[in-house]
Image: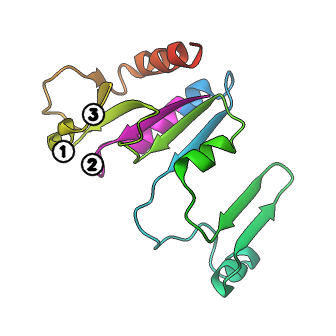
Amino acid sequence: MKVFSFFGSSSSGKTTVIETLIRTLRDKYKIAYIKNIPHDNLDLDTQGKDTWRAENAGSYETIALSPTRTYRLTRKRSDIDEILASLDSDIVFIEGFGGYARSIKFLVIGDESFLRFSHDFVIRANNSTYSGDAIIFPEEASRIADIIEGRASS
C-alpha cells in the first residue's frame, strides 16, 4: 500500500485533484481516502435519519450497512497509522496531513507560504500566480496519475 498526501491552503484545489485521481485510477486499484478535518462540527448523515439520531444520542460506534457499503462513525480519535493498518487498499490518498512522514507529499499550491513545508511535488490548480516548478492541473492530471502509478508499483 502506498500513501499519498495532498495538502495546502483552503480552496487550493486539493479535493478536486483527489477526486479526479480516484476517477482515473479506480478501475485499476483499490483506493482509500482519508480526510483530516480539523474541527468536530460536521454531520456525516442526514439530520433526523436513524444513524444520525443514534450518533447524536451518543452511540460510541454507529455503523450503517447497505447492500454495497459500510459506513462507520466511532467516537474516538484514531491515529493515522492505526487507520492505515486497518485498510485493504492499494493506494491511499490522505488530504490535509501534510506532515505525515510516510507519504509521498503533493503540495497543492494556494497560499505560497505552504512552500515552507516539506513536499515532493507541487501542483498548481487554483493558483494562477505561482511561477515555480509545478504540475499544472487539470492540464497535466495524467502526469500526477503517472507519478502515483509509478510509485504504487514500486
6 relative position to 30: left or right:
left
Left or right? Give the position of 100 relative to 152: left
Residue drawn at x 47%, y 72% as measured from the top left: 40
In the picture, the quarter occupied by the N terminus is top right
- Which residue position holds label 3? 118
Contact? badges 2 and 1 (CB < 8 Å): yes
Q: What's the residue at 59%, 68% (across, down)?
A: 76
- Residue 57 % position (x, y): 68, 86
Position of 73 relative to 91 (above/below)? below
Q: Nearer the viewer, mark 2 or mark 3?
A: 3
Closest to the camera, between mark 1 and mark 3, is 3
Tag of residue 141? none
Q: Is residue 6 magenta?
A: yes
**Looking at the image, which is closer to me, 146 or 58?**
58
Which amino acid lies under the numbered mark 3 shown in the image of this protein?
A: Ser
Q: Which residue is mark 1?
A: 111
